[in-house]
Image (spheres, rainbow, N blue to C red):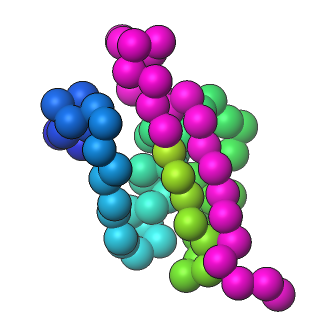
């Protein structure tokens, strides 16, 4: 359903605010091929993940083409 919404509105930004478990599921499902396991994703309230799809390039693939990680505060 999420990908259907993204495909129906390809030039829009979609924001999901959620707790860590759901974020791990989304990253595990949609992030570019990664060797990270479900529990290895660093999910905290100070991290912003941006997933970008090139819908023309990966028509049949559900994984995003770009994953950006931004730390919102310095340690």
Measuring from the top left, give residue 35's x and y in whole percent: 71, 37
Relative depth, front residue between 12 and 66: 12
- The span shown in magenta is 52-75
Measuring from the top left, give residue 54's x and y in whole percent: 46, 24
Quadrant of the frame with the N terminus: top left
Relative depth, front residue between 10 and 59: 10
Magenta segment's dominant SS is loop
* Residue 9 shown left or right of residue 59 in the figure: left
Residue ID at (79%, 84%): 74
* Residue 53 shown left or right of residue 67 in the figure: left
* Residue 40 shown left or right of residue 3 in the figure: right
Q: Is residue 48 above or below residue 38?
A: below
Measuring from the top left, give residue 52's x and y in whole percent: 49, 38
Quadrant of the frame with the C terminus: bottom right
* Residue 43 shown left or right of residue 60 in the figure: right
**Residue 60 within the segment the image draws in magenta:** yes
Q: Is residue 19 above or below residue 3?
A: below
Can the viewer see residue 46? yes
Residue ID at (43%, 67%): 21
Can the viewer see residue 3? no
Measuring from the top left, give residue 53's x and y in whole percent: 45, 31
């Amino acid at each position: 359903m999420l990908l259907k919404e993204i495909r129906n509105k390809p030039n829009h930004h979609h924001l999901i605010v959620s707790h860590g478990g759901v974020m791990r599921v989304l990253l595990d499902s949609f992030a570019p091929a990664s060797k990270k396991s479900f529990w290895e994703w660093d999910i905290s309230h100070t991290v912003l993940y941006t997933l970008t799809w090139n819908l023309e390039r990966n028509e049949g693939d559900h994984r995003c083409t770009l994953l950006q990680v931004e730390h919102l505060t310095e340690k």
